[in-house]
Amino acid sequence: MAILVLGGAGYIGSHTVYALVEAGRDVVVADNLVTGFRAAVHPKARFYRADIRDRAAMDQIFEQEDIEGVIHFAASSQVGESMTDPLKYYDNNLWGTTCLLKAMASHGVDKIVFSSTAATYGEPEKQPIEETDRTEPTNPYGATKLA
């Protein structure tokens, strides 16, 4: 059974893929390559150029691969850009995750690791930030990750 890494051609995603492959795991990567790079994907990982907002593409991956769990890094993640183009962030980060979750449910996959961000907390009241601290994002990026 394989782990599907969404956003696996990005910086954090590609390093995660390398660690999984080196640990002997079977890895499938899906990335739309908007900010990722195909060359960053481990050669032993199977690659699909796909966008999480494309439900048909997500279904195809789940139908072709024996996926046991998902690691989700496929988010738009630039705080400044989220302020000037918030709809891009709501579309990709919220709608994309909704499409992914629907595809997972349809194919009986119930394990996901979701990459969050400290931006969900806004201006922290104390440091270090703890998961139980108040969440009050100050930008669309943080708001979409919290949602």
Image (cartoon, grey):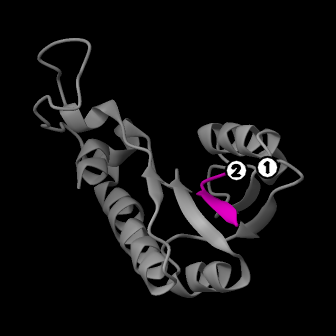
Residue nearest the observer in this picture, 4 or 119: 4
Residue 97, image x and y in percent? 40, 66
Residue 79: quarter of image: top left
Looking at numbered disc 2 in the image, what kind of residue is underneath it? Ala
| Mark 1, other Cα within 10 Å: few <14 / some 14–19 / many ≥20 | many
Residue 121, image x and y in percent? 20, 32
- Which quadrant: the N terminus? bottom right
Query: Judging from the image, what secondary structure is the residue with disc 1 in?
Result: loop
Q: Earlier in the sequence, mark 1 or mark 2?
A: 2
Magenta residues, start to end: 1-8
Q: Residue furthest right?
A: 43
135 left or right of 2 in image: left
Q: Is residue 96 above or below residue 114?
A: below
85 left or right of 136 in image: right
| Residue 4 in magenta stretch | yes
Residue at the (42%, 63%) spot, across then down: 92
Whether label 1 touches label 2, CB < 8 Å: yes
Q: Main secondary structure of the magenta part?
A: strand
- Which quadrant: the C terminus? bottom left
Q: State the mark number for residue 41.
A: 1
Q: State the mark number for residue 29.
A: none
Residue at the (57%, 78%) spot, across then down: 58
Distance from Cα at disc 1 to Cα at disc 2: 5 Å
| Residue 55 in magenta stretch | no
All told, the count of numbered labels is 2
Q: State the mark number for residue 9.
A: 2
| Mark 2, other Cα within 10 Å: few <14 / some 14–19 / many ≥20 | many
Residue at the (81%, 57%) spot, across then down: 45
